Amino acid sequence: MYSGDRSARPISLDTLRRMKAEGEKIVSLTAYDASFAAQMDAAGVEWVLVGDSLGMVIEGYDSTLPVTLDTMIHHTRAVARGLQRGFLVADLPFGTCNTPEQAMQSAARLMQEGGARMIKLEGGALQQELVAYLTARGVPVCAHIGLQPQFVHKLGGYKVQGRSTEAASAMRREAEALVAAGADMLLLECVPATLAAEITAAVPVPVIGIGAGADVDGQVLVVYDILGISLGKRPRFSKDFLAGRGSIAEALQAYAQAVKQGAFPAAEHTF
Ligand code: KIV
């Protein structure tokens, strides 16, 4: 079993860049509390995301839109207390980054009060100015492109993005523009595997995928999905790693090992 060493040096952005350069897969999951964070450290999860998915899996809303900055800070702080090694990332929730100044205030609270090391934000190419503003002021940024759940009402549902030739070209340009603006990482959600592989090869920063196939630098999933306890139907790109195993610790280790070895995602989890 692959197992993380909680006494090992904390993961930094440099570690993640080195992993991309060396072709070592980055293991990621969402976390919302201290106990799960400690379990993730022990299992070897390297990139730990306090996602605004907490609005759906913790708070029971039908989208991420109701999540507030205070709620994100509360959960980020809890995860930070349980985490010794993993790199802690927090989402900027809906409506908290409408201007560069507002984004900076929100990001500063997530870092100062929550202990986040990186901020993830949705919004795609429109966020170039904001990414440049934040990164110039010491905020590491992960730009989330592809399916962006904060846009669910505009998109009309949770759908795979970048399927047409035009949409794929636009996403390639968007990824490059965000990296040129200073994005330190990209997250690709629900994107055809071939497009995700092209973007990953084209950009110098680590790319984490969710529903984006195997040829990205790392994988993230919602932890409650891999334990089979999320409300509603588990997404096609996810897998229940607790099924057939005796404990949450074993399920997390199995997930970490499958990502490291390239065994997850398989064809059935890919678009
Ligand atoms: O909010 C979240 O958990 C996320 C993941 C789905 C990547 O953004």
Image: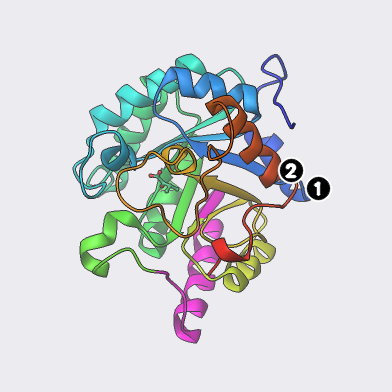
Q: Residues within 10 Å of mark 1 (few under 14, many from 20)?
A: few
Q: Is residue 2 a member of the stretch shown in magenta?
A: no
Residue placed at 51% from the left, 45% from the top?
240
Quarter of the rendering containing residue 269: bottom right
Instruction: Give above or below for 150 relative to 53.
Output: below
List x then y, in percent, for residue 67: 23, 39
The answer to whether residue 214 is seen in the rendering is: yes
Q: Which residue is mark 1?
A: 22
Please identify the quarter of the rendering in which residue 260 is found: top right
* Identity of the residue furthest to the bottom in this view: 165
Secondary structure, mark 2, is helix
Q: Residue at (22%, 67%) from the top-left corner? A: 154
Magenta segment's dominant SS is helix
Question: Relative to the observer, which residue lies in front, 25 or 206?
Answer: 25
Residue 206 vs 83, above or below: the answer is below
Q: Is residue 257 left or right of residue 54?
A: right
Residue kind at label 2, given as amino acid type: Met
| Residue underneath mark 2 | 19
Q: For numbered disc 1, what is the local secondary structure?
A: helix
User: In the image, residue 194 lies at what x, y percent?
Assistant: 62, 73
Q: Residue furthest front?
A: 244
Depth check, front residue: 127 or 72: 72
Q: Is residue 45 at least partly visible in the picture?
A: no
Question: Magenta region: which residues?
Answer: 160-187
Give yes or no for contact between labels 1 and 2 (Cβ–Cβ under 8 Å): yes
Which numbered tag is attached to residue 124?
Answer: none
Q: Percent from the top left, x then y, of residue 205?
A: 63, 52
Left or right side of 89 for 108: left
- Up-down relation of residue 136 to residue 71 (above or below): below
